[in-house]
Amino acid sequence: MTIPESHCASTGLLQNNRMNLDALYSELTLKTKAKLALVVLDGLGDLATKEQLYLTPLEAAATPNLDKLCKDSAQGRMIPAAPGITPGSGPGHLGLFGYDPLEFQVGRGVIEALGLGMELRHGDVAARAKFCTLDKKGIVIDRRAGRIPTETCEKLCALLAAKIKKLGDTVVIIKAGKEHRFVVVFRGSGLEGPLTDADPNREGFAIPTVHPRDVNNAGQKKMAALIADFYKAALPILANERPANGFLMRGIAHQPHIPLFEERYKLKAAALAVYPMYKGLAQLVGMKKIEGPATIAEQFERYLREHDHFDFFFIHYKYTDKAGEDGNFSAKKKAIEDFDAALPILLKKKPDVLAITGDHSTPVAIKGHSWHPQPVLLHSAFSGSDKLERFTETGANLGSLGVFEAKYLLRLMQANARMFDKFGA
């Protein structure tokens, strides 16, 4: 396909504009003593439907602490990637970290591998995998194998790792994650990503064959053949297992270069996350992973202990997304209430700038990620008050922040921290 010159010119102009804007932000950035916190309730956004009595879980939840906070806060909604595009967790979080997810595309395998503490060498290709259930014809009937416990995942990964150490001249490294998730790293010469996914993204279909994203790339072609060989070797090993007798693979890619967070924002950053993927995303941009906390209350307690050592905190809460993917309204509502109950711990040392939001929406009605803008609450001495009684999707629609792209949230947080000098005379 021939790309029109006008399109090339406009694309180049957009890239130059982005570079110029980043340069401007860098030029205006001041180092301050402000403390900033980005608290992410994964998949927070939802839809008010007739079946849900026109309420979202956030609207139905009892959230006295969020209610109190929002009276002195601004609200709005954020487009995670681009209008109509449903983002994965990687693009969703990169946007929150201020990196344009359309410009910085990172394979989910790389993120998951880093989050599990795996060392990725130059030329390694990583894939994020999850056990699934296949019927006798090889059709996927449960994409998460009933969310098997982590102990079962570890046993199955050990079984695969013992029997598949190499494929030709390529070393295969397998490591279990949480529940049904695991990572496979391929280490050899001439390997490259990204590839298409070996995941139909829905039940009722067979595992698709992977293909190079660039049909002329020899490294991607070799990698696609290796994935096919891995399936041929691994599926017979799992054939008699129940319910995890198969697996899906996504985000098959190598590690890209991304500007570091501290260089970009002049903020020393820490990450308090439980699940490997979110630890990996934070590590990818240079945040310090803080290991140990397992609940949101423990994460907030650790924030108090680390408060004086960092300028910026990324705190991730998974369970809103999990309940949304299960289509469980009551569980998502309870996850929000559990978060709200723990919030006073964080507020013992309230950050100078606090943003509470999601990385995307995971509506109960859809049982998965969606393109709908997620709500955001921004609190600081300079955020002003939108005079809203609650933090909800409906309230966020009325807020002074309006609807904006998620990649600007960090810049708004910096502005509220008085980190920008005046632009122009």
Image: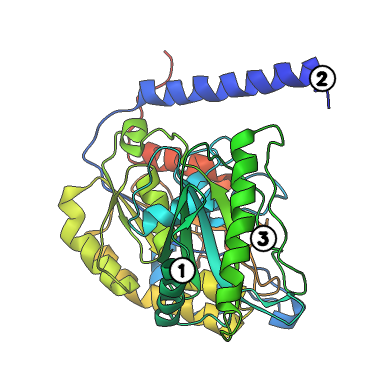
Q: Which mark is residue 370?
A: 3
Q: Nearer the viewer, mark 3 or mark 1?
A: 1
User: In the depicted view, which residue is nearer to us: 243 or 373?
Assistant: 243
Pointer 3 and pointer 1: residues touching (CB < 8 Å)?
no
Which SS class for mark 3? loop
Q: Secondary structure at mark 1?
A: helix
- Mark 2 or mark 1, which has the lower sequence index? 2
**The N terminus lies in which quarter of the figure?**
top right
Left or right of residue 93: residue 404: right
Spatial CA span between label 2 and label 3: 32 Å
Horizontal arrangement in the rendering, residue 130 relative to residue 266 (left or right):
right
Q: Amino acid at mark 1?
A: Lys
Q: Nearer the viewer, mark 2 or mark 3?
A: 2
Residue 318 visible (yes or no): yes
Q: Residue at x 29, y 39 (%)?
A: 267
| Residue appearing at x 51%, y 19% in the figure | 20
Residue 385 relative to residue 88: left or right: left
Task: Specify the label residue 163 is tagged with.
Answer: 1
Residue 327 in the image, given as x and y percentages of width and height = 64, 78
| Quadrant into which the C terminus falls | top left
**Where is residue 49 drawn, in percent x and y?**
73, 74
Q: How far apart are the two marked residues, 3 and 1, measured between alpha carbons?
A: 39 Å
Residue at 66 percent across and 72 percent down: it is 367
Badge number at residue 4: 2
Q: Residue at x 46, y 43 (%)?
A: 188
Mark 3 / mark 1, whichever is N-terminal:
1
